Image (tube, grey):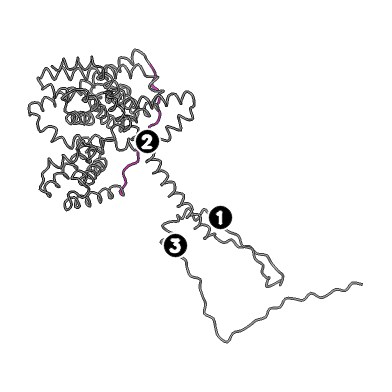
């Protein structure tokens, strides 16, 4: 016999208090400054919500009912945002370390080769030898273990972008100390040098361009796209203000403590370097139309010279001693210019990576590139020597300007092979040649009806090296690979030619 037990019904019991409770409203949690700064809204909104389940009694049926509420995961979002910022900071630190290590290896290799060549009394440019070695290693790895070659290129990519970003800055010291380099040059000789500089640039441009066009018509090779070239990042406001602070603080400190860092050159180094860098940053930010007339390098050199003039006036030492502190040419007592020119060897080493990246393009258009560069290099060297003799320029000055169309890094190596050459004048003439090309190369190419990007790139780099290359490639990126190749090969062939004693003797014979 079954017995059914009655199910007790749930009853509601009301309790009253002798006092009334105030109606409390939960506080509104507005985003704090901390959360606005470190946790992006997009990050918070995309994180998953948490689900909370709980049991209640239905007021009508008086039976248990299971309900579910979705609660935004505020705490987990904050944790995730913190993790994201931490990983971003780690990525930045690792990127800086990557740059320091890759650039440090290139600088160390350049310094080691210089010491080795000096110890062995070898006159061939050490950086050029290092460039050939790196290029050979990359080619070998690409043929045997392609992944290793790609990994090596990737490892040195930050250093190469750093060099590309600051490349024009490494040419500036020669312009900054130009007043010292030409102070002993007679006015008549200076005018002759200017004539050779401008006329030689135009003649070399024509020779390289027409040679490239003639070879192009003969071989009839179709133009293919080049490998994309990486672009360095623009300058930030933080960088500008940082260098401004360095300039002001070190300038004032040097006035009150002239030998605070041991010597006057070392004490002046921070504010002269900061003035040079700031001038380049400001010049790079000028409108395009202004930069056609007022090139960033001119702005850079002018900034350093005006700062040196101001310090010379305030310290009552004059301009010339301060410019002497800028470029001492002494490794034990370097100035700001010595620091910048110390990167020139690494620039040459970086050519190996550029040529390797464009190896397919070099192979496909080898006839046009090599023929044009070799002919224009020979023409530039021997025409300069001949015209210098015809206008009766002093032999020592003519020798100093022989490598006028070769990049500074290799031009200085070339003139070191000749006795009595003025290396400061060499560097200044090379930079001025580049400035002439940078300002007038595009209009001149149009006037000469050079339409082919190969001819335009080779003609520009062969006559105005790096500065002309930068000016043309900014508006014609399709010509950049040929500019970069000719820019490197022009200096290489010039250095190899001048390393041959018979060639040096023939040039000296023409100079007289």
Q: State the CA–CA distance, disc 1 to disc 2.
A: 46 Å
Assign the C terminus to one quadrant of the image: top left
Judge whether residue 15 is colored magenta: no
Seen at 40% across and 24% down, the residue is: 136
Q: Mark 2 points at which residue?
A: 105
For the question of whether residue 114 can be seen, the reply is yes
Q: Main secondary structure of the magenta part?
A: loop
Alpha carbon of mark 1 to alpha carbon of mark 3: how far?
19 Å
Q: Give the range drawn in magenta.
A: 221-237
In this view, the residue in front, 287 or 381, is: 381
Local secondary structure at mark 1: loop
Residue at the spot of label 3: 31
Residue most toward the top? 218
First in sequence, mark 1 or 3: give its number: 3
Residue ranking furthest to the bottom:
18
For disc 1, the marked residue is: 48
Q: Which of 148 and 8 is in front in this view?
A: 148
């Amino acid at each position: 016999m079954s017995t059914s037990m009655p199910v007790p019904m749930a009853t509601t019991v009301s309790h009253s208090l002798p006092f009334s409770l105030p109606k409390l409203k939960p506080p509104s949690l507005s985003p704090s400054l901390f959360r606005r700064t470190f946790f992006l809204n997009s990050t918070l909104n995309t994180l998953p919500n948490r689900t909370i389940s709980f049991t209640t009694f239905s007021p009508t049926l008086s039976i248990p009912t299971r309900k579910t509420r979705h609660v935004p995961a505020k705490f987990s979002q904050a944790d995730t945002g913190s993790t994201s910022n931490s990983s971003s900071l780690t990525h930045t630190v690792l990127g800086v370390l990557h740059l320091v290590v890759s650039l440090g290896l290139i600088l160390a290799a350049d310094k080691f080769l210089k010491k080795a060549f000096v110890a062995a009394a070898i006159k061939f440019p050490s950086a050029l030898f290092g460039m050939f070695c790196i290029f050979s290693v990359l080619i070998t790895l690409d043929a045997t273990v392609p992944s290793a070659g790609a990994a090596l290129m990737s490892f040195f990519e930050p250093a190469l972008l750093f060099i590309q970003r600051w490349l024009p800055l490494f040419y500036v010291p020669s312009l900054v100390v130009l007043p010292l380099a030409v102070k002993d040059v007679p006015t008549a000789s200076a005018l002759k040098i200017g004539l050779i500089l401008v006329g030689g640039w135009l003649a070399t441009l024509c020779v390289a361009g027409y040679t490239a066009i003639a070879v192009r018509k003969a071989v009839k090779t179709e133009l293919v796209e080049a490998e994309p070239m990486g672009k360095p990042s623009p300058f930030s406001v933080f960088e500008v203000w940082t260098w401004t602070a360095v300039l002001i603080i070190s300038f004032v400190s040097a006035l009150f403590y002239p030998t605070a860092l041991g010597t006057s050159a070392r004490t002046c180094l921070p504010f002269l370097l900061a003035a040079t860098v700031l001038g380049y940053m400001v010049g790079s930010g000028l409108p395009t139309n202004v930069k056609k007339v007022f090139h960033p390098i001119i702005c850079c050199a002018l900034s350093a010279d005006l700062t040196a003039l101001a310090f010379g006036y305030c310290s009552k030492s004059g301009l010339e001693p301060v410019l002497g502190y800028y470029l001492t040419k002494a490794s034990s007592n370097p100035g700001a210019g010595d620091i910048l020119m110390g990167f020139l060897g690494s620039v040459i080493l970086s050519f190996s990576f550029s040529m390797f990246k464009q190896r397919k393009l070099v192979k496909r258009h080898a006839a046009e590139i090599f023929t044009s560069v070799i002919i224009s290099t020979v023409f530039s060297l021997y025409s300069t020597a001949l015209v210098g003799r015809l206008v009766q320029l002093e032999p020592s000055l003519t020798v100093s300007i022989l490598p006028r169309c070769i990049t500074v890094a290799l031009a200085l190596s070339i003139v070191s092979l000749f006795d009595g050459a003025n290396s400061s004048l060499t560097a200044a003439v090379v930079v001025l040649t580049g400035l002439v090309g940078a300002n007038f190369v595009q209009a001149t190419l149009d006037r000469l009806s050079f339409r082919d990007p190969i001819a335009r790139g080779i003609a520009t780099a062969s006559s105005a090296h790096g500065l002309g290359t930068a000016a043309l490639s900014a508006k014609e990126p399709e010509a950049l690979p040929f500019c970069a190749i000719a820019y490197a090969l022009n200096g290489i062939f010039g250095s190899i030619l001048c390393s041959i004693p018979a060639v040096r003797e023939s040039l000296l014979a023409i100079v007289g």
